[in-house]
Amino acid sequence: MWGYEMQKICFPLFMLFVFETVAVTLWLTMDNLFYLFNFSYIGISISVGLFLFIKNYKHARRVVQLLVGIYMLVYLGLICNENMQIEGFWYYLFTGVFEAATIHYAVAKIFGPIIFGRGWCGYACWTAMLLDFLPYRTPSAPRRKLGWIRYFVFAGALAFVAALFLARVGNLEKIMFWSFIIGNVLYYAVGIAMAFAFRDNRAFCKYICPITVFLKPMSYFSLIRVKCDKDKCVSCGICRSVCPMDVDMMDVSRTRKNATECILCMECVRHCPKDAL
Ligand code: SF4
Ligand code: SF4
Ligand code: SF4
């Protein structure tokens, strides 16, 4: 029992270690103290949230969402003028600048998901931070076949930035700043409208969000996964009914239904009456 408790306490420390490793590596290799501050802050926020979760604090995930989401949106986006939307990623990639937005994508959305899956979506995304406050926490209807829309949004963002470069438009920094603001307003407007239309807070994540084009395939290989202990499970189906992302938790395989949709929110774990997850 004590060993199990220790294992649980070690998990936040492990996550802190992962983020501190990234923080120190980037600080030293890029010779920029910002990376030490940035990734330490995010790592500490996530570890605090995990610790609160272990202590059964109901709103642990919300605490992390607010700590990280507001920091990214307000400090990095609005104050530091870093476009962290997908257009910003293409913009910095085209200019060859390996700076905050590119590193953010590499860590949170491209390579990080191999370790922590779609933890970004559960704990850090500022779009979902707001959507999760809406009234439809669990979807009331089966998922629709609209996931193809995300590829159009993804291609649209790429085409927008490519067109700016091809047309040699000037003052790109300013355009990127405004596209960050307008993009976020649009995401929030569409996300809120869809949540009410589909009675599902995460409808935007399921059908529209272009970031999932990176997140889904990478999170397939995620080291950190919620698994079902078949010996304890009594097939009551509660885990499925509380999952905001329609994941079939009773199947332990990586190919389970909506496997790459899991945002590690731990609602299924909290509600399982048999501690099977
Ligand atoms: S799917 Fe997109 S909008 Fe939803 S939480 Fe993930 S990154 Fe944010
Ligand atoms: S909630 Fe627990 S016991 Fe019920 S089906 Fe899911 S894993 Fe099995
Ligand atoms: S409820 Fe469970 S399966 Fe569903 S997203 Fe949250 S952690 Fe993943």
Image (cartoon, helix red, strand yellow):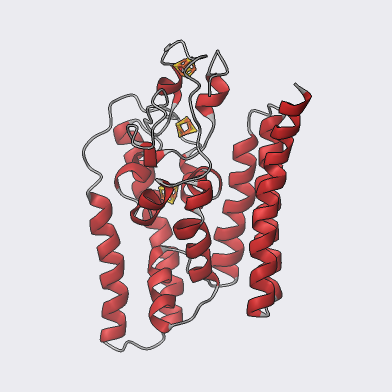
Q: Nearer the viewer, residue 218 or 155?
A: 218
One can see residue 255 in this view: yes
Q: Nearer the viewer, residue 8 or 182?
A: 8
Percent coordinates x, y for residue 136 in the rendering? 42, 29
Percent coordinates x, y for residue 131 in the rendering? 46, 41
User: Which image quadrant is residue 178 in?
Assistant: bottom left
User: Which image quadrant is residue 176 in?
Assistant: bottom left
Q: How many labels does the image show?
A: 0
- In the picture, which quadrant includes the N terminus? top right
Q: Which of 74 and 156 is in front in this view?
A: 156
Rendered residue at 25%/56% (across/down): 151
Q: Does residue 110 sit above or below 50 in this rendering?
A: below
Q: Does residue 262 sit above or below 45 in this rendering?
A: above
**141 with respect to 90 (left or right):** left
Percent coordinates x, y for residue 208 in the rendering? 31, 49
Rendered residue at 23%/35% (across/down): 144
Percent coordinates x, y for residue 80 in the rendering? 59, 72
One can see residue 125 in this view: no
Rendered residue at 58%/61% (across/down): 74
Rendered residue at 39%/64% (across/down): 86
User: Which image quadrant is residue 256 in?
Assistant: top left
